[in-house]
Structure formats: C-alpha cells, structure tokens
Amino acid sequence: MRVYFNYCVNCGAKYKYQASGSTWVVDEKYNDHEYCPECKKAILEALDKIPKKSELKWIDTDLVDLDTLLEWEKLENEEILIEYNGKEWAQKFPVMKRVFTTIWDPLSDEHSKTFQVNGREDHKDKLFCASYWPKSKKVISIRTYVRQDMDGNLIKYKTND
C-alpha cells in the first residue's frame, strides 16, 4: 500500500492520497491524485446534477471473425517490433499490452486466450476484444467498444480517415 501527502490543485490543502493497496486508509470514493477529499466531493456532487447523455460499452459483434482479429493482432505486434527496433530502451522494457484473466477448461486441460486489437481496413475507428479456445479456435466472444445513448442506441461519429 502506498499513501502519499499531496497538495490539492484547487484549494492547496495538504491531504493523504492512496496510490495503491486493497485496504483503504482514506475514503475510496474521494481518493484522488489531484483533489483533496473536500474538493473531490464537491466535484462529484456537481457532476451528479448533470444527467448522463451516453456511455461506453462492450457489445457482441459479428463485424469481423476470429481469423481476421488474429491477423490484425499479428500485424500490430510486428509494427510495434519494427517501431522499437534498434532503440536501446526498447530492449530493457517489454511492450505493454493489456492482460486478461483466463478461463480453464478441465475437460480439455486448456486455458482460454483473450486479447484486444485496434481495428483496421473498414473498422479503423473501432477497438475489438476477442476470447477463444486456442486448440480448437472456438470463439467464446468477439466484442467491440461503442458509445450508446441512455436508450441503448449506438452513437456514430465521423472519423478523420
């Protein structure tokens, strides 16, 4: 557990900020690296008065299949290696990717694999997440991240591509 003393960017008060740990020594709801608990509470109360207009959600999709996503992941990894090739610092630090927990199937003695990949081609503006069984390539789920209004309707944005 790491607890630091910070100074609030709004009022300048000195306060405790808990950067990590599972047991909270400060009120978790008002724990913030920039604002003291009093200012953070005021911010949250002000935001509670504004109704949400939309939210980001993962939804199941059939826009792409598993083979396409696996190819995109391979291309993405190759691009990262090319970009970092020859840079001294790149050999000291691994490429950071999101880590997912796995599901274990005791019947086949197999762990699932889950990965995220940025869309390509007609889906450049999307982020995909796929879960599957590697031995059989059986899909558990393929999802994409979308913005929906509060009635569940998709909100589409223009891209600059």
Image (cartoon, rainbow, N blue to C red):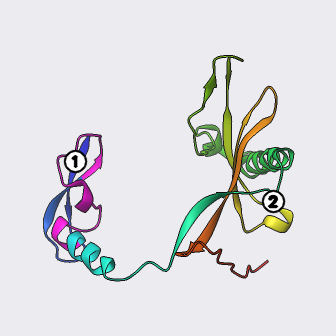
| Residue 113 position in % (x across, y down) | 68, 35
Residue tagged 2? 63
Please identify the quadrant where the N terminus is shown. top left
Tell whether position 38 is magenta. Answer: yes
Q: Nearer the viewer, residue 90 or 153?
A: 153
Query: For mark 1, does the 10 Å Cα neighbourhood hold few (<14), some (14 to 19), or many (20 or more) residues?
Result: some
Label 1's element? strand
Taking the view exactly as shown, the residue that stands out farthest to the front is 151
Residue located at (21% from left, 76% from top): 42
Residue located at (79% from left, 25% from top): 135
In the displayed structure, does residue 74 sit left or right of residue 19?
right
In the displayed structure, does residue 25 sit left or right of residue 112?
left
As shown in the figure, which amino acid type bears the numbered disc 2? Leu
In the displayed structure, does residue 99 sit left or right of residue 114?
left
Q: Nearer the viewer, residue 112 or 160?
A: 112
Residue tagged 1? 3
Q: Nearer the viewer, residue 152 or 91?
A: 152
Residue range in magenta is 18-39
Label 2's element? loop
56 w.r.t. 149: above or below: above
Query: Marks 1 and 2, how far apart in space?
Result: 45 Å
Tell whether position 12 is magenta. Answer: no
